[in-house]
Amino acid sequence: MTAPDRARLVCADLDGTLLNSAGAVGPVTRRALDGAAACRVPVVCVTGRPLRDALAVSRELGSAGLMGCSNGAVIAEVPSGRVLMCRGFAGDRAGFVLRRLRGRLPDVVLGVDTLRGLFLEEGFAALVPDCWPHEVVPDAVAGPASDDRVVKILAVHPAIPAHALADVLVDPGDGLAATCSTPYFLEMSLDGVDKGTSLRWLAAHHRLRLTATVAVGDMPNDLPMLRAAGLAAAVANAHRDVRRAADLILPSNDEEGVADLLAMVCGADSELPRSGR
C-alpha cells in the first residue's frame, strides 16, 4: 500500500453501523456528522436499503450531498432524489432470473427493489423482522411497472437461512452477486455490482484516490466497500468476516462507534492507521 492519504471521504453503512439498534442516530454521532461537514469531509450513506428509504434516512441526517443504496446499484443526490448512477437489470432480465429462481426453489418468497419502490410477495415481511416499507404483490415478476427498473432481487425462505440460500438458488452462470445485509434474506444484484462499486464511483466523483477513502460497516454486503477503501473500519457488533477484514475495530453501533471514527477523521492528524491490507 502507498503512504496513507488524509481521509477525505467516509462511506458508512446505515443499519447496524451508523444507526443504533432502535434505527436512530445517537446524539454523539449527530454531533460528529456536523463536525465532519464543518471540516468538509463528506460522509456518504452507502446502504442496502431501497432508494426511497435511503433518501429518507439521509435527509433526516441532514445530508446535502450524495448517497448510495441498493447495495451499490444506485447513487443519488439526497436533496433532489435525482439518480446519478444506476446499474440495474435491463429489459426482461430480472423476470428471467426470478422465474429461474422460482424453478429451483418453488416455495421461495421473492421481492424486487426498483427505482420506484420495493415490491415483496405476500409472506415476505412475516419472515423478516423490521421489514422495510414495501408494496405487497402476488408475484414479484409482475411487481414493477414496465418503465421502472429492477436494481436488486430479494429472496427469503421459511426453512433455509439467508446465508445458505445462495447455495440453493444461485448458479455461477446466472451472472449474479449474492450477499446479505441482514441474517434473514438473500440479496442478488448483477455480477460486479456491490458497495465497492459505490465507493469507487464516489471517489472518482470527488476526484480522490482510493487511499483517501474510509469505509465502515457491519455485514457481509459491506465487505466489497471495505476492501476497496483506503481504510476499512468495522463496528464491534459486526459479522466476524467484516471484523476480520477491518483495519480498525470501533465500539458498537449502540455505543456510537462511527462517531469515534469521524472524530479521528476530523482530528488534527487525520492520517488514520492502516494495517497494510
Image: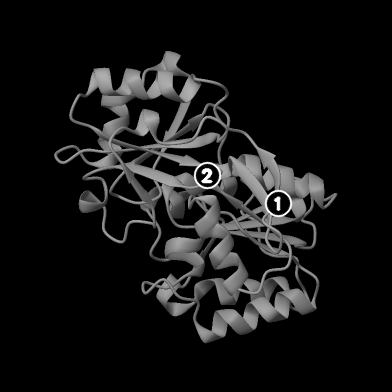
Residue 82 is marked as 1
Which quarter of the figure has residue 60?
Answer: bottom right
Residue type at tag 2? Asn
The residue that disc 2 covers is 71
Cα–Cα gap, marks 2 and 1: 17 Å
Which is more foreground, mark 2 or mark 1? 1
Compared with 92, 271 (above or below) is below
Residue at 47 percent across and 65 percent down: it is 17
SS at circle 2: helix
Q: The C terminus is located in which quarter? A: top right
Residue 188 spot, x, y in % from top left? 43, 34
Give the residue at the far top of this rendering: 173
Q: Give whichever of discs 2 and 1 has the lower sequence position.
A: 2
SS at circle 1: loop
Compared with 103, 45 (above or below) is below
Q: Are marks 2 and 1 in contact (CB under 8 Å)?
A: no
In the image: residue 263, left or right of residue 226: right
Residue 180 spot, x, y in % from top left? 38, 44
Which quarter of the figure has residue 268?
Answer: bottom right
Residue 149 spot, x, y in % from top left? 55, 34
Residue at 75 percent across and 75 percent down: it is 37
Residue at 19 percent across and 37 percent down: it is 160
Give the residue at the far left of this rendering: 159
Residue 174 spot, x, y in % from top left? 44, 17
Q: The N terminus is located in which quarter? A: top right
Residue 233 seen in the figure: no
Would you call the spot at circle 2 few (<14 residues within 10 Å), some (14-19), or many (20 or more)?
Answer: many
Residue type at tag 1? Arg
